[in-house]
Image (cartoon, rainbow, N blue to C red):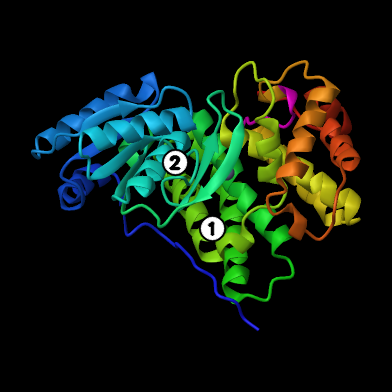
């Protein structure tokens, strides 16, 4: 017996390359005549002003707006109102995952087109028909499935190459999660599309392992293009083809749980997901008696150290975190149970807490494995 599944596989059009913006901006007036142009951080303001200026030269007066906090209800409501008051007929989101998600959510609510211009390769949010909603101080609340993927995605190498390398490392960890999560959650799937999506995630993982470090060291090299596009584009495509059945296992729910804690300085999405994958592999090792998971964990840990991304909870900006705080994160993971019920093994809070404590401090981990200290 087959049920029906609905897929939002990809943006209607993707323009990628050295001069993607130069070509892409010609298409913008065909999609929207009065766009709202959304961004967030001070560090990208100059780029955004340049893009807005370019649109002005095409007789498009974009209404600029910025997120004040996160992709949170307060910001979403405020910007929704700005879009409505100005009769905007399209949203352009230019930024990282939070900005792109916010742009997609507002376009979805207004049923108007959305254009995404990622300014880093830190997530695949420019591609997907999914968005995460956070509290104003960054705690994950829920995700929302949108009506469709963006109408146009412009992936301009010249712009993205300027992003800090930390965004690429974080994007790599987030994209790696596709394989670790999909292969666990879909291990017994008989659905061909899901099986093929999981294989694509495996190929992506291998390419990230092969090219990841070179990509970070040499922005603009062929490896950089493969890795940046793998993180921002392919990872989204995998989610689109596999659909809801091949999305999360434990790494993302653990990310969601950890965001509930009080960060000194908030780590990037993919950095938290990276630690989530390690904890997931540890759980697989302990609860499925899966020795391969142990090897996979060591392999991944070494790679994360190489690309200088955190491997412990403390190094995510949660220094001196108490065990009871970690318990709070566990409660959230199990309470929200986003897909974790479909996994090959079940967990209670005590078991999850025990696994998370193993990844509390870097000293702890470095002591157990023969690793050199990077940023951790
Ligand atoms: Zn993610």
The earlier-in-sequence mark between 1 and 2 is 2
Q: Is the shortest distance between ligand 1 and the CB of mark 1 under 8 Å?
A: no
The correct choice, above or below, for 235 with respect to 34 in the image is below
Q: Secondary structure at mark 1?
A: helix
Label 1: which residue? 239
Q: Is residue 61 above or below residue 180?
A: above
Residue closest to the eye, 37 or 232: 37
- In this view, the residue in front, 172 or 8, is 8
Looking at the image, residue 14 sits to the left or right of residue 163; the answer is: left
**Quarter of the image holding residue 101?**
top left
The percent position of residue 44, horizontal first and vertical second, equals 35, 25
Magenta residues, start to end? 307-314
User: Which image quarter holds the N terminus?
Assistant: bottom right
Instruction: Indicate if the residue with disc 2 has its beta carbon within 8 Å of ligand 1.
Output: no
Q: Which mark is residue 132?
A: none
Answer with the quadrant where ligand 1 appears in the image. top right
Mark 1, mark 2: which one is toward the viewer?
2
Category of crowding for the residue at label 1, using alpha-carbon neighbours closer than 10 angstroms: few (below 14), some (14–19), many (at least 20): many
Task: Identify the residue shown where x is 74% and y is 52%.
Answer: 340
Which residue lies at the image location 54% right of the left edge and 58% below the top edge? 239
Residue marked by disc 2 = 101
The spot of residue 98 in percent (x, y) is: 46, 35
């Amino acid at each position: 017996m087959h049920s029906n599944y609905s897929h939002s596989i990809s943006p209607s059009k993707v323009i990628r390359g050295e001069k993607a913006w130069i070509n892409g901006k010609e298409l913008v007036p065909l999609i929207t005549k009065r766009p709202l142009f959304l961004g967030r951080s001070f560090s990208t303001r100059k780029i955004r002003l340049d893009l807005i200026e370019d649109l002005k030269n095409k007789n498009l007066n974009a209404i600029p707006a910025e997120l004040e906090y996160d992709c949170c209800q307060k910001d979403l409501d405020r910007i929704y109102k700005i879009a409505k008051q100005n009769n905007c007929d399209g949203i352009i989101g230019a930024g990282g995952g939070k900005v792109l998600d916010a742009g997609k959510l507002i376009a979805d609510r207004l049923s108007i087109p959305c254009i995404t211009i990622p300014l880093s390769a830190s997530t695949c949010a420019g591609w997907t028909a999914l968005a995460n909603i956070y509290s104003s101080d960054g705690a994950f609340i829920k995700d929302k499935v949108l009506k469709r993927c963006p109408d146009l995605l412009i992936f301009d190498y010249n712009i993205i190459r300027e992003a800090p390398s930390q965004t690429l490392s974080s994007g790599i960890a987030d994209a790696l999660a596709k394989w670790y999560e999909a292969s666990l959650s879909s291990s017994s799937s008989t659905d061909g599309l899901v099986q093929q999506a999981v294989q694509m995630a495996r190929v992506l993982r291998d390419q990230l392992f092969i090219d990841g470090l070179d990509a970070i060291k040499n922005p603009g090299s062929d490896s950089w293009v493969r890795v940046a596009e793998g993180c921002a584009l392919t990872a989204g495509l995998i989610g689109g083809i596999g659909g809801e059945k091949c999305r999360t296992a434990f790494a993302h729910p653990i990310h969601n749980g950890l965001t509930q804690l009080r960060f000194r300085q908030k780590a990037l999405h993919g950095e938290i997901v990276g630690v989530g994958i390690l904890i997931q592999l540890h759980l697989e090792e302990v609860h499925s008696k899966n020795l391969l998971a142990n090897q996979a964990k060591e392999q991944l840990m070494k790679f994360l150290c190489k690309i200088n991304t955190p491997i412990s909870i403390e190094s995510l900006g949660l220094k001196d975190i108490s065990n009871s705080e970690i318990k709070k994160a566990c409660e959230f993971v199990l309470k929200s149970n986003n897909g974790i019920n479909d996994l090959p093994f079940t967990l209670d809070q005590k078991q999850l807490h025990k696994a998370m404590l193993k990844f509390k401090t870097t000293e702890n981990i470095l002591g157990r494995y023969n690793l050199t200290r990077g940023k951790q």
